[in-house]
Amino acid sequence: MSGKQVEVKKLLRKIVTALILVPLAVVIIAFAVANRQIVTVSLDPFSADQPAAAVTMPLFALIIALLILGVLIGGVAAWLRQSKWRRTARRLEREVSDLRSEVDALKRTAEPTSMLGQTSPPQRLKLRPPMR
């Protein structure tokens, strides 16, 4: 690709990013402004009146924190599920490396065929014309 094509591609990527991130930021800010009330999250299932572990925070902070936690858990789950493919890719890369080194070794040990001794091309197969 030429330099101009790369610059156009970068500019297009910036425009698309701005078209996605600006509305997303507006929605997140509007959500945070609309949900400023304070909520208490009880982490104690046995005592509702006097919980041993409780967190008080704005509702939007709680929802955003839970969203981030969900994304992290989903990412870890996807990473764990893809371990089979990463293992296969590493094994195949090792095989390719071994085969390349074997081919290089065979190329070094093979006798080079000298075409310098041939002055005329090889004799061609002579066919008769078809009979009618």
Image: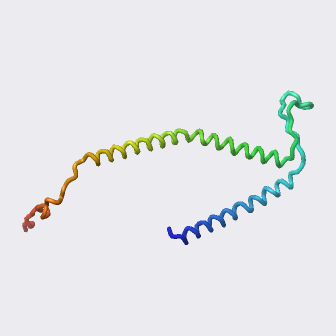
Is 3 left or right of 123, judged from the image as shown? right
Q: Where is residue 67 in the image (x, y as percent from the top left)?
A: 74, 46
- In this view of the protein, which residue sits in the foreground, 2 or 63? 2
Residue 95 position by quadrant = top left
Q: Where is residue 124 in the image (x, y as percent from the top left)?
A: 12, 62
Q: Please give the name of the residue rendered at 52% of the width and 39% of the height, measured from the top-left corner.
A: 84
Is 101 left or right of 60, judged from the image as shown? left
- In this view of the protein, which residue sits in the foreground, 101 or 24? 101
In the rendered image of this protein, does residue 19 appear above or below residue 101? below
Is 85 left or right of 97, judged from the image as shown? right
Q: Residue furthest top?
A: 46
Q: Please give the name of the residue rendered at 12% of the width and 64% of the height, measured from the top-left corner.
A: 120
Residue 81 position by quadrant = top right
Q: Please give the name of the residue rendered at 74% of the width and 62% of the height, measured from the top-left corner.
A: 22
Q: Which residue lies furthest to the bottom in this view?
A: 4
- In this view of the protein, which residue sits in the foreground, 66 or 5? 5
Q: Please give the name of the residue rendered at 69% of the width and 61% of the height, measured from the top-left corner.
A: 20
In the rendered image of this protein, does residue 60 appear above or below residue 83? below
Q: Position of residue 108 (x, y in %)?
A: 28, 47
